[in-house]
Image (spheres, grey):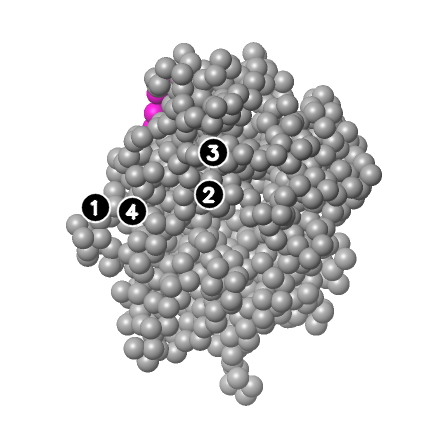
Amino acid sequence: MTALSIGDVLDVTYPGPPSWSDDGDYLAATVYEDDGRALQFAAADGSPLWRYRPEEAHVSAFAWRPGGRECLVATDDDRTLLVGPAAETVRTLVEAAEAGHAWSNDGDRIACYRDGVPWVVDVETGAARAFDVPERGPYLAEERMFAWSDDDSLLAYRFVDHDTKQVGVVDVGTGDLCYRTDTPASDRSPAWLSGDRLVLDRLADHATRRELVLVDPHEGTESVLVREEEPELGIVSRGAPAVSPAGDRFAVPLPLDGWDHLHVVDEDGSEQVTSGEFEDRGLADSTPRWLGDGELVFSSNRLAPEQRGVYGLDLDTGEVRPLVETPGTSVHPAPSPDGERLAYVHADTECSPELRVRDLGADPGSTGVRVTESAVGEWPADPIEPERVVLETDDGVEVPAFVVDPRGTDAVDGDATDLPAVVWVHGGPMRQMRHGWHPDRAYGLAYTVHQYLAHRGYVGLLVNYRGGIGYGKAFRQGIAADPGAEVDVDVVAAAEYLKGLDHVDPDAVAIWGLSYGGFAALRVLGTTPDAFDLGVNLAGVADRFVYEEWATETKYPPAESSLPSTLGGTRWESPEAWEAVSPVTHMEDYEVPLYSFHGTADRYVNVEQLDVVVEELLELGADFEFEYYPNESHVFSKQRVWERVLERIEAAFEAELRAPTGEAE
């Protein structure tokens, strides 16, 4: 048997979105390796330079200094650094817990939060000033928490008041709060247009109404530029507005015609500029990038539903030109400041995610220069090409999936029968497994695990259940009317598909999933007890009400939660619906073992969800095992933790899915 190991799985690295220095001479991107992120620098042509690894720490975030060649780097041990790739210099600016850093446009100051309070720090003198204004609050951060006006006199920022997100504007000179929102909606992601006009992204009425709002902070007036309303199924659009270099308009993907397409918005209204039965976004939260004032650069699945190419849209002519059309997934496109080059992240069936650079005029089918290189080329065995299949569900919906078949490897004979099989359910739910490696670590890791399992003789099926991106708004909203029930149908269809294959043992099919995938595993073991022979839950929700109570205090405000609208009311107004959607309600019907794993520092799903699982299954006397991991996050960060988790999961598969010696037919 080929010695593909768990070490090979965990040696795969994951580059993040690339960013150029203002002069275009340098490129930078984080790279997740081992236990955290390093910062990879490259020359303009893509030649790899320095990979900076903070001593005994990891990179949390970075941002190029405007007009300069230095990067502000925040670390996970509460340091703020200024890092220069030219001479490989590192200067400590602050040793304090800071977050949300944003450079002023002149490159002299940084805005950030310290203990939730907005501060401005002078980079050269170290002088720091706190503002006596409402504080950041407990909810998770958006990509853009601060925004400086063009002349750096005003600072927009997000805070929390009245149990929801608000946006305020501080006069940097006086420290006064000169404007603030004060609504029951959730206001976020402020961005400045020219003329000191502010754009806000507003989500309201339990995520059934979204508005992009133009604000004049001097007059205190506002007008709605774009409005989406989905009173029954909830809003499923995401992505902050991307302001043009001239500051007179912004671009944003919206599913107003049923598919995520690009819209360009100014004070006079919105224009849809792409169309077709495909989605013009790379990942769930992606937004387009501007190339000058007249072209948008974006990822799209025009190639195939589970692939992504990169395209440029000329806003004057409407012409779309392909920039990257190599098979696989190409996302995070970043044009260089001079418009000559493009940096992006690429992954496919033969290579895990790589950071690449290419000339914008190059053949769209060419590979480009690899800044980082996939570790898969060094594997002792070739990766297995996944097969795309379409599952037919009981309610007539076509659900795409990928099968990873171990036949053809030296793990099993080509005519093998009665192989064990495993269904993977991704998180989100607004995510999507790709034809090959996923660029995100959480889902790329799962795909890599299935490569490993195939070399151990397991058939894998990665299901793109309803609720995910890539197939239009109706598919994404497919789980809204009865959250959980449609996912049950889709994952059961995955199990039935596997059981119908001649080479699969129908009594040896497992399910595993992370986050929403963990929720799906916890649910289906009770709602359809005969579908699977084993379940594995990583950080899944067991009790929707317990989760909602925690989430609306720490993760997002009530205005952003769609459950009260899709379930017919709050927990007290619709108790039966809340109970029905919660996996804990169905645990009394479990017939197969469950293995559960959760980190105690999880900011996305509270660790008390595992408490619910343990308490309920102990009371029921069920067959289950579980482990908590101190100080671990939602997607475990430490390699040694993943080693243990994957060893435990493989041992469970071996114990529960393989026939004991002498019992195989």
Return the residue nearer the eye: 361 or 66: 66
What type of secondary structure mainly makes up the magenta span? Answer: strand
- Residue at which label 3 appears: 131
Mark positioned earlier in the residue sequence (4 or 3): 3
**Residue 411: x percent and y percent?**
66, 70
Residue tagged 1? 568
Please tell me which of labels 2 and 4 falls first in the chain. 2
- Judged by depth in the image, the label closer to the viewer, 2 or 3, is 3
Task: Nearest to the eye among marks 1 and 3: give it.
Answer: 3
Q: Which amino acid does the dot numbered 1 rest on?
A: Gly
> Where are the magenta residues, as a range?
224-228
Residue at 54% x, 88% y is 662
Query: How far apart in space, not on screen, are marks 4 and 3 (Cα)?
Result: 36 Å
Residue 139, quarter of the rendered image: top left
Pointer 3 local density, CA inside 10 Å: few below 14, some 14–19, many at least 20 = some
Place of residue 416 in the rendered image (x, y in percent of width and height, measured from the top left): 59, 71
